[in-house]
């Protein structure tokens, strides 16, 4: 089930029809109050969230979703007419997994939704743990600990950290990380990776230093000789 919160009736009807017609069961809402009522009854697999809304803006809603342990890992795609780099960075900083600007192609939106759902279903299937420095990841539980403290990450933050740690020592360009983590070409949007790395480092605290910036190239996770890889 996908929840769409969009106050424009034309866009809401069109997107809902297109997604349902593509086999993606979708329920749409005009008002945040109706959306929250539905959330109290059943959590969706993914949320499409507009920013400019009556009653409550989308960024405020996103922050509430991310601050609640029950919903913190729900995939969220921002769907909005605000398309400046600042607006995109603000949305990603607030915990969005992806950002689609209006006007948009319904095929592009479907591609991004399916890629995010695919990444969600594929994650957390490995067993045991993965350790680098003071960070320990439990893929089967979808949990991350830094200095023995559980860290609350968004889906994309988690997937980015998991990829870098699983491939520690390997340097990946921003474009490669966009392809690996987001699952499709994301031309011109490399700023997305930088934002996620910044928030990852912030959430990991002093342990965030394991993510190294390779100037002019990209990023890598740098471990120590004593790190054990159990996957």
Image (cartoon, rainbow, N blue to C red):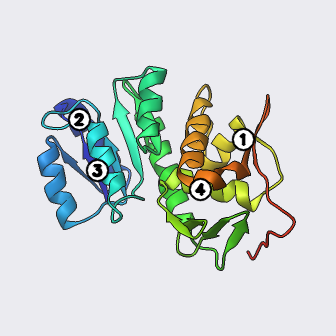
- For discs 3 and 2, the disc positioned in front in the rendered view: 3
As measured in the structure, the alpha-carbon distance from the residue carrying label 1 to the one carrying label 3 is 31 Å
Q: Secondary structure at mark 3?
A: helix
Which residue lies under the disc numbered 4?
Answer: 159
Q: Secondary structure at mark 1?
A: helix
As measured in the structure, the alpha-carbon distance from the residue carrying label 2 to the one carrying label 4 is 27 Å
Which residue lies under the disc numbered 1?
Answer: 176
As measured in the structure, the alpha-carbon distance from the residue carrying label 1 to the one carrying label 4 is 14 Å
**Residue 8 location, quadrant:** top left
- The residue depicted at 64 percent of the width and 51 percent of the height is 208
- The residue depicted at 37 percent of the width and 60 percent of the height is 45
In the rendered image, the quadrant that contains the N terminus is bottom left
Instruction: Please state if 136 lies on the left or on the right of 109 as rendered.
Output: right
| Mark 2, other Cα within 10 Å: few <14 / some 14–19 / many ≥20 | some
Of callouts 2 and 4, the N-terminal one: 2
> Seen from this angle, which residue lies furthest top?
84
As measured in the structure, the alpha-carbon distance from the residue carrying label 2 to the one carrying label 1 is 33 Å
- For discs 2 and 1, the disc positioned in front in the rendered view: 2
Query: From the viewer's perspective, is residue 231 above or below residue 50?
Result: below
Which residue lies under the disc numbered 2?
Answer: 57
Measured as percent of width and height from the top left, residue 76 is found at 39, 48
Measured as percent of width and height from the top left, residue 96 is found at 43, 43
Measured as percent of width and height from the top left, residue 204 is found at 58, 54
Q: Which mark is residue 64?
A: 3
| Mark 4, other Cα within 10 Å: few <14 / some 14–19 / many ≥20 | many
Total marks in image:
4
Circles 1 and 4, Cβ within 8 Å, touching? The answer is no
């Amino acid at each position: 089930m996908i929840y769409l919160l969009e106050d424009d009736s034309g866009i809401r009807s069109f997107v809902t029809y297109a997604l349902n017609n593509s086999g993606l069961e979708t329920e749409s809402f005009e008002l945040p109050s109706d959306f929250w009522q539905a959330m109290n009854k059943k959590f969706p697999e993914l949320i499409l969230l507009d920013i400019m809304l009556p009653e409550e803006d989308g960024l405020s809603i996103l922050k509430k979703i991310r601050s609640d342990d029950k919903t913190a890992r729900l995939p969220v795609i921002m769907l909005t007419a605000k398309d400046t780099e600042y607006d995109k960075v603000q949305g990603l900083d607030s915990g969005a997994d992806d950002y689609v600007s209006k006007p948009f192609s319904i095929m592009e939106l479907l591609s991004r939704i399916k890629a995010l759902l695919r990444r969600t279903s594929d994650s957390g299937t490995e067993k045991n743990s993965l350790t680098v420095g003071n960070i320990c990841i439990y893929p089967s539980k979808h949990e991350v600990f830094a200095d023995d403290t559980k860290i609350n990450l968004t889906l994309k933050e988690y997937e980015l950290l998991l990829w870098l740690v699983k491939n520690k020592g390997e340097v990946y360009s921003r474009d490669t990380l966009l392809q690996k983590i987001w699952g499709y070409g994301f031309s011109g949007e490399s700023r997305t990776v930088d934002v996620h790395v910044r928030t990852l480092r912030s959430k990991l605290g002093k342990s965030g230093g394991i993510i190294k910036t390779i100037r002019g190239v990209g990023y890598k996770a740098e471990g120590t000789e004593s790190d054990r890889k159990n996957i």
